[in-house]
Image (tube, rainbow, N blue to C red):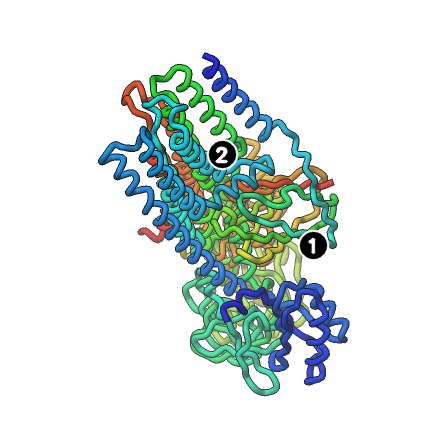
Amino acid sequence: MTSALIVNLVGLLLVAAISWWFWLQPRRHRAEAVNAAEKLRVLVRDGVYEPDRIRLPAGEPATLYFRREDPTPCAEWVLFPDLEVSAQLAVHRDTAVDIPAAEPGEYPFTCQMQMYRGTLVVE
Amino acid sequence: MAEESNRPAHRFRLEGASCAGCVRKIESALNDVPGVDEARVNLGDRTLTVRGDADPQACVAAVQGAGYGAEEVRTSEREQREQQRAEEQQHYHQLLWHSALALGLGVPLMAWGLITGEMGVNSVPQQLAWGGVGLVTLAVLVFCGGHFYTGAWRAFRHHNANMDTLIALGTGTAWLFSMLVVAVPQLLPEAARHVYFEASAMIIGLINLGQALEVRARGRTSAAVEKLLQLQDPTARVVRDGGEEDIPLEQVQVGDRLRVRPGEKIPVDGRVLEGGSLVDESMLTGEPVPVRKSEGDSLTAGTLNKNGSLLFEAEKVGADTRLAQIIEMVKNAQSSRVPIAKLADTISAIFVPTVMIIAVLAALAWFNWGPDPRAAHMLVVLTAVLIIACPCALGLATPMSVMVGVGKGAEYGVLVRNGKALQQASDLTALVVDKTGTLTEGAPKLTDIETAGDADQLLALLAGLEQGSEHPLAEAVVTAAREKNLALPPLEDFEAITAHGVRGTVGGKKVLLGNGKLMQREHIDAASLRERAEQLAELGRTAMFAAVDGTAAGIIAVADPIRDDAKDAVARLLELGLRVEMLTGDSSATAEAVAQQLGIERVHADLLPQDKEKIVGDLQQSGERVGMAGDGINDAPALARADVGFAIGAGTDVAIETADVTLMRSSLHGVADAIELSRATLRNIKQNLFGAFVYNTLGIPIAAGVLYPLTGALLNPIIAGGAMALSSVTVVSNANRLRFFKPSEVQQ
């Protein structure tokens, strides 16, 4: 009886933990800032963009350099749907992606299948 | 050699370097730049090659510091593609190899289980044997599927979950459970002492196989861009210091003089300096007849020089050529989002954690209410749900179709700006067409000349008079006279009378040419000609009266000839269920006549340019989804206002930048092609989305065991793995079917 209780409790805790970790937990980790003149390299590897939160000053165009280390086709494109920017990423080399000047706000960027996810914070 | 080519290399074009001393200075300046392994200057083509991890900007700065100029030469798109192809091929083989290895372990294990039924752990020897198998399985999992685990971990740390997470959790749980059975069988009831090593190995093998097939199928989706890239030769022949030499295309600069021999492709955009030849531009304009080029004519990169040798000056190179812009546009459009995918996108965003929660809840349900062996059932359900859920199919559904559809369009000379334009083009209800240049040639021609006297003599007089005029109709008269090789008499006292016509003294005779009002004003009796003039107007021609020395001399008519293919194209558009309306600045009589010949029912005539936009707006107000086809120059506001603007006119730069759909071919058929293609693409997207939704909404409950009461068995996680691997391959393959799209005109 107690074992049944424990299993159920663990199960429900897992559900809570999943919801908390993936949805509720605010993404507090550091956002990398980049000035228009600087060069920011985003590493595309193992299913994540690193960094996956990038801060840009508003109203200035910028260039991000995506370095794709993952040869799987998932990682091939990076899309900024709200900015109408997209780029095909070459494997093992930097691909420059020009970001136009944008209004302050958060702009998600993803791979084609949305497995890689990142956010561009314009402020 | 292999190692050398693996190190990143940057190439720079040097300025001001001309002697061996410069070489030494530049090379030593670069050796001080951090990250430079080797710097080599080639004086022959004035380039600098730098190997190592150095920042190209720093290299440029170092060269500038040494007193020279440097500009990075980007590797050609084509080279990059080839490199990517090679990478892809390597990745494909690696996936196959990993798959074979994992299946090589999984299949015999599965066979053993099926044949002997002995997958349980009930004695110490069994514990030892399965323990060994477990360790081998772990090695295979790590070797063949290690990236799933590292990927899952990395994503987890970023509060992210993706496909890797599902695979890692599914196979990891199966392996851990089996190892638990092996290590402490007494913890579990006898019926649940079952190992699932074969499942983890098989799943990893099948998913690798699925990814390999996907890489294969995906390679074909970008065939269109590849074809465009192949229109460029990798080298160009530049004429320098009297000699000719082949240099890489990337090194051609604006102002270079280039030689193209018969059978060669034009390397960059430019203007002919010397020579004449026929040039086949069909790859860019769809125009099958080669165009004659001679001194002063412009040439476009990617077109084929047929029979003569041409010397020309480069005007646009690299990314500025029209071909490069087209390729860029196609690539951008291929990766753009389609509004219809919005729901799929929203679901994808929360998909993986949701599936994880469902898996846990399903396992709990089996634990609480399921039959024995409950622990084993829990594990099977948990693994199967995690593995069968396929976010890829959902995520791939639209992008793959858009990729193939947009690429296919480029093949037919239809350049779609983005996914939104593609979707809107598929559900247009009305199409507004600008007459001039779209339905008609846009260059009026003399169609009739009627006189009691000598027609040629009259034509010569009128052409002599019209020499002074800038009216487009005047050009038709002058051209007709030139074609007949008539000598034009000298013109004096030319006067244009607004809204009436023109008059002047030609070869000593007083000549008048204009409409009926002009004849009235000048008191000339033209009654005998009026009836004929009306007949001509009914045919869509513009008739003008001519008078010489005060008496009516005859009548001439000018018309803008209807394009050969306009009637068929309009018929196709009507067949597609569109309401076709014509816009024109011409008088309504002429316009009606043209419309009647083409089978168009609604005509808006006598329009000023700004009226066109208003008509598009009015149609939209009345609930129509309006497409507008025009040449992109005069009707830009209307094109912009329309839901989809189709710019016809061999893709002028302006059009490429503003229109939703640019038609390289100057034909209304392009609009029909574009609409058919967009409908086919949207149909394909819907099939994919439907398939992916159905797959996941059916697959997950089945994996959770809803069919157990009927079948008495749970879904084997291996089958779940196979289904998941197949689902994304199916989506990509279905998208690839679009490659066989053919517009209906071609089918006939």
Q: Residue at x 44, y 78 (%)?
A: B262
Q: Is residue B20 visible?
A: yes
Question: In front here: B654 or B710?
Answer: B710
Badge 1 crowding class, 10 Å Cα cut-off, few under 14, some 14 to 19, many 20 or more, is few
Question: In front here: B728 or B156?
Answer: B156
State which chain disc 1 sits on: A
State which chain disc 2 sits on: B
**Left or right: where B465 falls relative to B675:** right
Residue to which mark 1 is pinned: A39
The image shows residue B472, relative to residue B20, as above or below, that is above
The image shows residue B272, relative to residue B641, as above or below, that is below
**Left or right: where B387 falls relative to B647:** left
Q: Residue at x 41, y 64 (%)?
A: B288
Question: In front here: A66 or B576?
Answer: A66
Task: Determine the residue located farthest toward the top in the rendered image.
Answer: A1
Instruction: Tell me whether circle 1 and circle 2 mark residues in contact (CB < 8 Å).
Output: no
Kind of element beneath mark 1: loop
Total marks in image: 2
Task: Determine the residue located farthest toward the left in the rendered image.
Answer: B115
The amino acid type of the residue labelled 1 equals Lys
Residue to which mark 2 is pinned: B344
Please provide percent x and percent y for residue B378: 40, 24
Please provide percent x and percent y for residue B34: 70, 65
User: From the viewer's perspective, is the residue at label 1 or at label 2 nearer?
Assistant: 1
Q: Residue at x 43, y 75 (%)?
A: B263
The amino acid type of the residue labelled 2 equals Ala
